[in-house]
């Protein structure tokens, strides 16, 4: 299990496995590595639509990825599936201290003109349904082959207005570590792929007054009759309040 490099104020956040909330003074963290439990439990909810759509734990046989979540859009043209936080009403507020989200993931296939899909991952948002096309507030990575030439896109959105910038990295089917982080009260969000900062966004960042929900991954098709999948190895969210709670 890789070590999650801490941002300032998020020390001592390392885990060996399982979903474990962590509390130490003003530090909070959640780490899910999909080796135990189910993808639909007291922390997570799974929403799917269309024949063959599902989100479930699988074994890919890859040596360094023992616990994997498959988010699979099924065989119907508008099939989709997602894993989000369990609450139907968003419950998470951005902290006034430093925070970080990290997700190891890979696409099983790429989107194309025949089997077209949209992928969202490593995010916080207000959407609860897999077919939701409008996000009021959120922060996430997004991909489809027609968006920025098939490159990963970093998005910050608040009150239905968004800033979407290309990460400059074309999506592929290899494992990558996606990271989103913010410094204390900075109003800026930094996006990283494989520990390299690819985008910084300071506009349309959801304020602390907005409540959001985890969005570990969503696959939503718009054409085609073949399943398309996203694999997730682990998800981490750590944050710190400036004043201990």
Image (cartoon, rainbow, N blue to C red):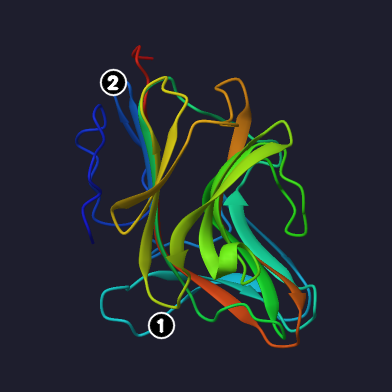
Q: Nearer the viewer, residue 163 or 99?
A: 163
Residue 130: image location, x then y, percent: 73, 59
| Left-right relation of 167 to 84 | left
The residue lying at 77 percent from left, 53 percent from top is: 132
Dot 2 or dot 1: first in sequence order is 2
Q: Nearer the viewer, residue 37 or 198?
A: 198
Q: Is residue 21 visible?
A: no
Q: Which residue is mark 2?
A: 25
| Left-right relation of 122 to 50 | left
The residue lying at 75 percent from left, 53 percent from top is: 129
Examine the rendered structure and indicate whether residue 122 appears above or below residue 107.
above
Q: Secondary structure at mark 2?
A: loop
- The label shown at residue 93 is none
Instruction: Give the quarter of the image for residue 48.
Output: bottom right
The residue lying at 23 percent from left, 29 percent from top is: 8
Which quarter of the rendering shows the C terminus?
Answer: top left
Q: Nearer the viewer, residue 66 or 73?
A: 73
Residue 27: image location, x then y, percent: 32, 27
Q: Is residue 150 visible?
A: yes
Q: Secondary structure at mark 1?
A: loop
> Cα distance, mark 2 to mark 1?
38 Å
- The label shown at residue 60 is 1
| Left-right relation of 133 to 213 | right
Instruction: Give the quarter of the image for residue 239.
Output: top left
The residue lying at 31 percent from left, 59 percent from top is: 194
Instruction: Give the quarter of the image for residue 98.
Output: top left
Residue 206: image location, x then y, percent: 59, 30
Which quarter of the rendering shows the N terminus?
Answer: bottom left
């Amino acid at each position: 299990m890789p070590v999650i490099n801490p941002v300032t104020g998020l020390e001592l956040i390392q885990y060996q496995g399982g979903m474990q909330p962590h509390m130490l003074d003003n530090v909070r963290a959640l780490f899910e590595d999909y080796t135990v439990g189910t993808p639909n439990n007291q922390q997570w909810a799974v929403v799917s639509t269309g024949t063959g759509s599902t989100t479930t734990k699988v074994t890919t046989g890859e040596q360094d990825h023992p616990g994997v979540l498959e988010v699979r859009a099924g065989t119907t043209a508008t099939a989709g599936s997602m894993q989000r936080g369990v609450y139907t009403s968003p419950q998470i507020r951005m902290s006034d201290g430093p925070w970080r989200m990290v997700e190891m993931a890979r696409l099983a296939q790429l989107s194309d003109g025949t089997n077209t899909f949209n992928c969202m991952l490593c995010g916080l948002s207000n959407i609860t349904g897999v077919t939701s096309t409008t996000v009021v507030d959120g922060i996430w990575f997004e991909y489809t082959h027609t968006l920025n030439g098939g490159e990963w896109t970093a998005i910050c959105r608040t009150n239905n207005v968004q800033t979407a910038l290309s990460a400059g990295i074309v999506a592929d089917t290899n494992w990558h570590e996606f990271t989103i982080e913010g410094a204390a009260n900075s109003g800026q969000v930094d996006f990283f792929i494989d520990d390299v900062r690819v985008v910084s966004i300071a506009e349309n960042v959801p304020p602390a007054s907005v409540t959001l929900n985890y969005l570990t991954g969503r696959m939503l098709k718009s054409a085609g009759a073949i399943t398309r999948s996203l694999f997730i190895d682990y998800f981490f969210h750590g944050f710190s309040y400036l004043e201990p709670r």
